[in-house]
Image (cartoon, rainbow, N blue to C red):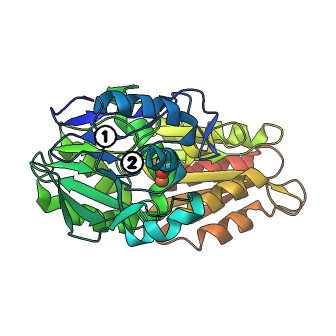
Amino acid sequence: MKNFSESIKYIGVDDTDIDLFEGQYVVPAGMAYNSFLIDDEKIAVTDTVDSRKVMEWMAGLQAALAGRKPDYLIVHHLEPDHAGGIAQFVALYPETTLVASAKAFAMLPQFVELPEGTKTLTVKEGDTLSLGKHTLQFITAPMVHWPEVIFSFEQSEKVLFSADAFGKFGIYDADPDDWACEARRYYFNIVGKYGNQVQAVLKKVAPLGVKTICPLHGPVLAENLEYYIGKYNTWSSYAPEDTGVLIAYASIYGHTAKAAKVLAQELEAAGVPKVVVSDLARSDMAEVIEDAFRYDRMVVMAPTYDAGLFPVMEDFLNHLKAKNYSNRKVGIVENGSWAPMAAKKMAEILATLKNVTLCETMVTVKSSLSAESLAALKQLAKELI
Ligand code: FEO
């Protein structure tokens, strides 16, 4: 679907040897940095790529230009995974006009030193830029995912350039049929904190009659757009997407892990449609965060450590707090051998979250499961069913 239009050409690149995207996210299927060329009386290029791949991008850009020169570089998002090529672009095409929001131009010198006399065009909500047959209409999208972000809507072909929104981890055409899996992990970990801002921009986009979405990562979306927009609507409203229980646990010697397994069996036996069990010390944290948001219920299970909470669980709950985890039911299971403290610490963090209901039964496992703690665990399972 790269070539969905005669006039709009894909000139993005794939990054298959990056170890961590944004310095923290594993991307086993690589990462795409999308960029497009709109070919009209005036030629516009949308965004650049990460500095790791600028040479490859420039080669593709020059091939697409076939000797012509671009008139505009539209900077939808200034984050370096998209703005790593601005300096080289301006050096090669000094006559080009950079188009971006006022906030982007204010931040730009922090990243790039532009030559004196570089032409710029500051755009705001509703401004348009005619390229000939094509016209770009700008839509501000602050905090989706940085404050300077703009979307643009090409009116003649009804194409939305949506910055990071609707993006996913993975190279351009990796797993095109399974967009939601890596788009969800991307959304909750990278944009998840800004649900209200995503909701606001979705409302602005709704009346436009978008036919194609060109995100900065992942595939161009040109069919079944209600599906993708529906997912974004669910995710950004912090509503659970699926019925199920995430059991996120940490375990030092395996006793809490065993309790997690027993609880999972209880829930499955009672017909809970989906039970996901994740060992926080060994799982991709971003994946567990994704599952926490995906399902309507969660159980957190962790040992006491240094008179507090086992570190990886504290990290997990603080991640959820940072991403505005809300509107879910949560059960707590602690382990402690002489002075259990984990449940209190977990409850303290969960109490700060909006509309998170704690199960009445809080289970304390003293070192290993006993008849008493097993009964409490079964009681917790009943509350979750
Ligand atoms: Fe893909 Fe927020 O950068």
- Circle 2 crowding by C-alpha within 10 Å: few under 14, some 14–19, many from 20: many
Q: Is residue 119 left or right of residue 50?
A: left
Q: Which mark is residue 59?
A: none
Asked whether residue 217 is in view, the answer is yes
> Image point 37% across, 46% down: which residue?
242
67 is higher (above) or lower (below) than 300: above
Q: Which residue is mark 2?
A: 47
Instruction: Mark yes or no: residue 272 visible.
Output: no
Q: In which quadrant is the N terminus drawn? A: top left
Mark 1 and mark 2 residues within 8 Å of each other at the beta carbon: yes
| Mark 2 CB within 8 Å of ligand 1 | no
Q: Position of residue 350 (x, y in %)?
A: 60, 67
| Residue tagged 1 | 36
Q: Nearer the viewer, residue 26 or 266?
A: 26
Amino acid marked by disc 2: Asp
Position above or below: 176 against 44: above
